[in-house]
């Protein structure tokens, strides 16, 4: 298995400007690229351990909220959490969902240092034109607070405008990355 730099040297030696390259040389270069050490580090026993957990369909909580989710990353290094949350009931604020691989997801997050409730602002969309007219905006902003623990995923959402309660059809689609192995908060 050749390194990326060796493959580049071989390409420079074989491919000349305004020159011809033999099919056998092209074949060798392409195979070297596919077998490149840097591209195949995961399969050669490195300490990088990829994972991916996702919902096949929506997960529903008691208020009818629906959540589609994906956790993808490398164990003990990096986790990306992407989700779509659709609101089904008016004035809902709190949601509780259970993932199919809850214990494993929690363990992965815990090992990179995620062990606290997080909050950030999210865009809230709704296809109903009455909602957009009410606030005179294409979308609204909400404060999104969540926690992932051994019991599940819990979230609270509060609108940032006066009297902005969640409405049926509101949708939040966002992604957040977790990477904090260098430090542990006390």
Image: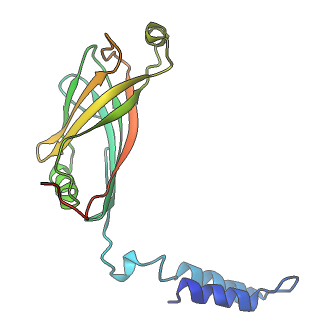
Q: How is the image coloured?
A: rainbow
Q: Determine the image quadrant of residue 63.
A: top left
Question: In which quadrant will I find the C terminus?
Answer: bottom left
For image coordinates 33% across by 81% down, the residue present is 45
User: Is 29 in front, or is 74?
Assistant: 74
Q: Position of residue 88 (x, y in %)?
A: 30, 20
Q: Determine the image quadrant of residue 75.
A: bottom left
Q: Position of residue 152 (x, y in %)?
A: 16, 42
User: Is 7 in front, or is 68?
Assistant: 7
User: Is 165 in front, or is 35?
Assistant: 165
Height in image: 65 above or below 16? above
Height in image: 151 above or below 138? below
For image coordinates 23% across by 60% down, the residue present is 112
For image coordinates 77% across by 86% down, the residue present is 15
Q: Position of residue 51 (x, y in %)?
A: 31, 61
> Would you say 169 lies left or right of 60 here?
right
């Amino acid at each position: 298995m050749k390194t990326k730099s060796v493959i580049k040297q071989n390409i420079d030696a074989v491919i000349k400007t305004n020159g011809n390259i033999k099919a056998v040389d092209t074949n060798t270069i392409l195979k070297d690229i596919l077998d490149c050490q840097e591209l195949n580090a995961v399969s050669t026993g490195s300490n990088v351990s990829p994972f991916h957990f996702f919902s096949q369909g929506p997960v529903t909580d008691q208020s009818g909220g629906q959540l589609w989710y994906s956790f993808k990353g490398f164990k003990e290094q990096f986790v990306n959490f992407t989700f779509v949350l659709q609101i089904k009931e008016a004035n809902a604020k709190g949601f509780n969902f259970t993932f199919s691989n809850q214990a494993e997801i929690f363990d992965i997050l815990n090992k990179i240092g995620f062990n606290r409730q997080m909050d950030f602002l999210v865009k809230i969309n709704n296809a109903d034109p009455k909602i957009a007219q009410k606030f005179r905006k294409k979308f609204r902003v909400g404060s999104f607070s969540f926690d992932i623990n051994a019991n599940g995923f819990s979230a609270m959402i509060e609108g940032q405008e006066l009297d902005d309660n969640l409405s049926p059809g509101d949708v939040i689609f966002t992604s957040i990355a977790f990477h904090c192995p260098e430090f542990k908060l006390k």
